[in-house]
Amino acid sequence: MPRRYAGAPLAGRAAFDRVVEDRALGGTQLGTTAGCETGAVEQDDEIPPELAGYEPGEVGALRGPRMRRVTRIVVLVAVAALVLPGVLIGVSTASRTAALACQVVGSTSAPDAIFLEARWEWSGEEGPGWYCYATEFGGREIQLRFLGFIPEVKVVSPGVRV
């Protein structure tokens, strides 16, 4: 009969035989009172021979410096590949929204303007965000409105109080 270690999982017929043997010997817990083939009682803290002499932390790094560098580069490229599309989609959506919002503002605030433009500015009067500019016929540029960090336009119908 092969030797089994304390706590090792038993399967099928072997598990059934072990339970029957334990009950026949009057044991209350498997592996604590039933003897093994040597007649000795197995202990739960018995160390299998495969692990005898093992000291935690004894082994150095499993990967060398070159492999760690390659792994770091692969991880950085993977993170960039996950983040970059979201950033590009967010910027393009904000740009289109700002252009449309500027068209709405320009149609009501500067109907005679020859050109309307939405621009991102880091240091505008109201802080970083999108600003709408109108160019008049003579080439003079006028700031119409601050559209916000995330561009939006609140359109109010005439006669409605805000």
Image: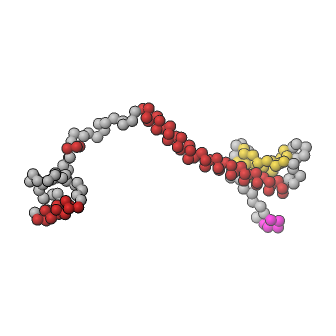
Position of residue 140 measured from the top left corner of the image (x, y, whole percent): 87, 43
| Magenta residues, start to end | 157-161
Tell me, yes or no, whether the highlighted magenta stretch contains residue 122: no
The residue lying furthest to the right in this view is 138
Residue at 75% x, 60% y: name it.
154
Position of residue 118 measured from the top left corner of the image (x, y, whole percent): 76, 48
Left or right: 68 in relation to 142: left
Left or right: 31 in relation to 85: left
Which of 113/4 is in front? 4
Left or right: 54 in relation to 69: left
Q: What's the coloring here? A: secondary structure
Residue 56 visible to the viewer: yes
How many numbered marks appear?
0
Position of residue 133 measured from the top left corner of the image (x, y, whole percent): 80, 47
User: Main SS type for the magenta part?
Assistant: loop
Residue at 68% x, 52% y: name it.
93
